[in-house]
Amino acid sequence: MTGKRKRISLNSWFYNIIKPVLRLWLEKQFSLEANIPDEVRNLKPPYLILPNHQGFWDPFMVGIYIKHQIFYIASDAVFRSYFFKFLMLLLGAIPKTKAQSDIDALKNIIRIKDRGDIIGIFPEGRRTWDGVTLPLVYSTSKLIRMLKVPVVTVVFKGGFFSQPRWSFHIQKGKVLMDYKILFSGDELKRMKVDEIHRKLADALFFDEIEYQEKAAIEFKGKKSAEYLEQVLYTCPSCKKIGTMYSEGKAFYCTECGYELEYNLLRSFDSKKNDVIFDNIRDWNRWQQENLYKLLNNSINGGNVLIIDENLVFHTGYKSNKLKYLISGSLGLTGEALTIRDNTGIIVKLFPLDQITGLNIQNKERLEFYHEGTMYTIKGRSKRFSAYKWLTAFEYLVRNNASQFQAG
């Protein structure tokens, strides 16, 4: 019990020193602005603060404008690094296993609420891939109904292009945050979870592409397109998967030569060929449908639908240190994920219906649980698209579930 309580403590001395320094740095790096009404400024804890999730620095950006300290739910993967574990514990982060229920995290949340502090949660559970708010985790709405405390939402605008999840460089433009009290707390006693969920989804929905088309903000930074193939993994011209390649602000297909430039307004243009999709959102929507069709056409017969080589596999559990397992390839059939060694021999086979908690951690590492063991997959190249695997896996799981229900 003592160990768990340490996880939700916060070093006030450290926090009070770093907060003003961090605010100055963030405002300079991102041209950061915040719209905070007086009702939010004067709101007394306990309450929940729920932002949409666009970039790595989101929790810090939200916190620097709030008078009281925020205790964030953080992926337990962050705690595997000794440095980040030390930092997160100083800042009072609450570790939680991504994409799975976690009773220890829930107990810590209740403790924080009972002692009168603020709880920070990103209801999407992961950062947006194409600038549009992702579907929210339903259990967040259940938690809101259970805690019955005020709920503050924060909507980021401009954060997706400022902190691209594929990039290692900040892109300087402008980031705006809008704070709002969505629920005062008392009305939650009369509301059903579905109603809470709908209102929360409406409040946090944001389309960065639509916003940028009107705002026309220029974003300046190094190598703006580099590693964009982590997200956009399919060529819209020849429809080949895994052939897109980025370099600086150039983005092109190694198979058919389709070539684009990622410009300052964060849209695509070209001097060589017609532009099929001028933005990431529309490209991503198309490639998802294209992948679904490929999977549907090839799903029977046990054939390998997708394969990636030159990968590194580790095992672990929650925040424990990872252990090296093997180097080799990852394959996907309609029924299972397979790990093969470098000679092509299958060393692990995971039926899709036995995989839980599949998600993507920072630095494009695919992660899931099977029979109580966590497996992580990372490419030796930074161009590995874990997002492609997540998209395919989630589709096959939905497809298998619908077939089971129909049967």
Image (cartoon, rainbow, N blue to C red):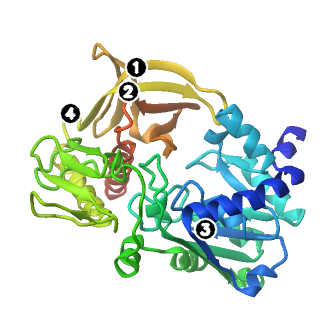
Circles 1 and 2, Cβ within 8 Å, touching? The answer is: yes
Amino acid type at image mark 2: Leu
Residue 352 image offset from top left, x and y in percent: 40, 39
Residue 332 image offset from top left, x and y in percent: 30, 36
Q: How many marks?
A: 4
Please say whether residue 142 is visible from this viewpoint.
yes
Q: How far apart are marks 2 and 4 (CA)?
A: 20 Å
Residue 167 image offset from top left, x and y in percent: 43, 49
Of callouts 1 and 3, the N-terminal one: 3
Circles 4 and 3, Cβ within 8 Å, touching? The answer is: no
| Kind of element beneath mark 2 | strand
| Kind of element beneath mark 1 | strand
Residue 329 image offset from top left, x and y in percent: 33, 25
Q: Distance between the residues labelled 4 and 3?
A: 41 Å
The residue under the point 59% across, 32% down is: 372
The residue under the point 88% across, 66% down is: 116
Mark 4 sits on what residue? 303
Q: Is residue 13 above or below residue 117?
A: above
Q: Which mark is residue 327?
A: 1
Q: Callout 4: few (<14), some (14-19), or many (20+) C-alpha neighbours within 10 Å?
A: few
Of callouts 4 and 3, the N-terminal one: 3
The answer to whether residue 205 is left or right of residue 346 is: right
Q: How far apart are marks 4 and 1 (CA)?
A: 22 Å
Please say whether residue 9 is visible from this viewpoint.
no
Of callouts 4 and 1, the N-terminal one: 4
Of discs 4 and 1, which sits in the foreground? Answer: 1
Amino acid type at image mark 3: Pro
Q: Callout 2: few (<14), some (14-19), or many (20+) C-alpha neighbours within 10 Å?
A: many
Q: Is residue 170 above or below residue 327?
A: below
Mark 3 sits on what residue? 51
